[in-house]
Amino acid sequence: MQAKITLLPGDGIGPEVVAEGVKILKTIGQKFGHTFQFTEALAGGIAIDETGNPLPDESLAACQRADAVLLGAVGGPKWSDPSAKVRPEQGLLRLRKELGLFANIRPVKVYPALADASTLKREVVEKVDLVIVRELTGGLYFGQPQGRRDNEQGRAAVDTMYYTEMEIRRLMRVSFELARQRRKKITSVDKANVLASSRLWREVAHEVATEYPDVAYEDILVDSCSMYLIRHPSDFDVIATENMFGDILSDEASMLVGSLGMLPSASLAEGKFGLYEPIHGSAPDIAGKGIANPLATILSIAMMLRTSFDLSQEANAIEQAVEAVLIDGHRSADLAMPGQPKVSTTEMGDLVSESIVNS
Ligand code: IPM
Ligand code: MG
C-alpha cells in the first residue's frame, strides 16, 4: 500500500523520537512492500519561534492532506510563561479540534520484562492491560464561556464543562467497539453525583450500552476510579471518560507501567484518519542528549498501522520486536535499573528495526 504521513516533530525530545518512528516505518515498508511518503511540518514552540503561531495554517493543511499524522511533543519552559499570549499547547488543542480528533486512545500495558520498573508491587501491576478512551474535543477544554472575569470583588475566571449527547454517544460507541475486540468490559467514568454534564454522560452511556448487550458495562465515579486504578488496576479493560477526567486518569495509569517512555496513543476522527503520538511530552531536561526512550513513539506507529491502515500483521511485528528487545535486556535510561547498561535513542530504534527484519 501507499500512505501519506505528516510528521510534526515539535519540541524537546520530539524530533529525536520521531526520527526513530520514521526509521521503523521505513523498515516495515521494505519488509512488507509498502511506500510511506513523509512531509514534515512545524507545530508547538518551534512553530512559535519561526512563525509566531503554534500551528501555522500550512501545518494544519499538511495534516489534512495526510492519511495519518505522527506527532513528537510540544512545549517546554521557553514557552511556558503563564502570561504569554501564545502557547505551544494552543497549537495542539487547535489541531485536535480542526482535525475532529474526538477519541483519544491510551493503552496501558505492563510488559512482564518491565514489571519491576513500577513504583507499585509487581503482583499488583503485572497483569495490567487496559485502555483509556478519553473524549478529546469537548468538556472543560473547549466549553464556552472560558476566560478571565475580573470584577469589583477582584480577580475571577471561568471554564465550562459542556457536552452534547452527540459527543457522548460517539465516544461511547468507539469505546464499546474497542471493548468488543478485547475483554468485553467497559467502565464509564463520571462525576454524576455532582455534575449535570456527568448525569447526561451517564444517561447517554446507558443508552449506548443497550446496543452492546455482549459487553459488560459499569459506571464509576472519577474519584473512586482513581483509587481503584492503584488498588486493583488489572480489573479494568476499557475506561471511557470525558476530556479532563481522562487527562488526569491517564497520567495516573501511566505510572502502572513505570515509565512514561513506553506509552503510545492514538487520537481518532470519524473514519480511518488519526494522529499518533507518544504520551510522554517534550521532556526538555533530557532533550538533545540522545537518551530519550523511542519505544512509545514506535508503539504509536504500531497503532497507526493497525488503526489507520488496517495493517495488523505489520503492527504485530512491531509490538513483538519491542517485546523481544526488552526480553533481551536492552534498556533506555528511563528503564534501566541502577548499574544496568543503557542504550541510546538511536540504538534502541536500531535494535527494534533489526528485530523486525529478522522476525
Ligand atoms: C495530554 C496533555 C495535553 C492535554 C496538554 C499538553 C495540553 O497533558 O495530551 O494529556 O492536557 O490534553
Ligand atoms: Mg495530559
Image (cartoon, rainbow, N blue to C red):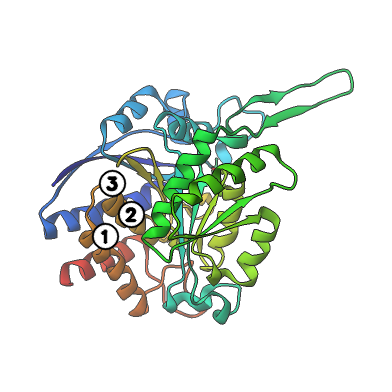
Report which residue position mark 1 lands on.
Answer: 315
Q: Earlier in the sequence, mark 2 or mark 1?
A: 2
Q: Earlier in the sequence, mark 1 or mark 3?
A: 3
Q: Residue at x 43, y 56 (%)?
A: 289
Location of residue 252 in the rendering, given as x and y in whole percent from the top left corner: 60, 59
Which residue type carries mark 3?
A: Ser
Q: Looking at the rendered structure, which numbered label has been put on residue 147?
A: none
* Nearer to me, 136 or 9: 136
Q: Residue at x 48, y 75 (%)?
A: 127
Tell me the distance, in whole angstroms, between the alpha carbons under discs 1 and 3.
11 Å
User: Where does ligand 1 appear, by image quarter?
Assistant: top right
Residue 275 visible in the picture? yes
Location of residue 58 in the rendering, given as x and y in whole percent from the top left corner: 33, 24
Q: Is residue 72 above or below residue 24?
A: above
Which residue type carries mark 2?
A: Met
* Nearer to me, 318 or 59: 318
The number of numbered discs placed on residues in the rendered structure image is 3
Location of residue 138 in the rendering, given as x and y in whole percent from the top left corner: 55, 35
Give the quarter of the figure containing the C terminus: bottom left
Q: Are marks 2 and 1 in contact (CB under 8 Å)?
A: yes
Report which residue position mark 3 lands on.
Answer: 308
Q: Residue at x 42, y 68 (%)?
A: 332
Query: Which corner quadrant of the image does residue 274 belong to?
Result: top left
- Mark 3 surroundings: few (<14), some (14-19) or many (≥20) residues within 10 A: many
Which residue type carries mark 1?
A: Ala
Report which residue position mark 2 lands on.
Answer: 303
Q: In terms of secondary structure, where does tag 2 sit?
A: helix
Q: Is residue 64 above or below residue 316?
A: above
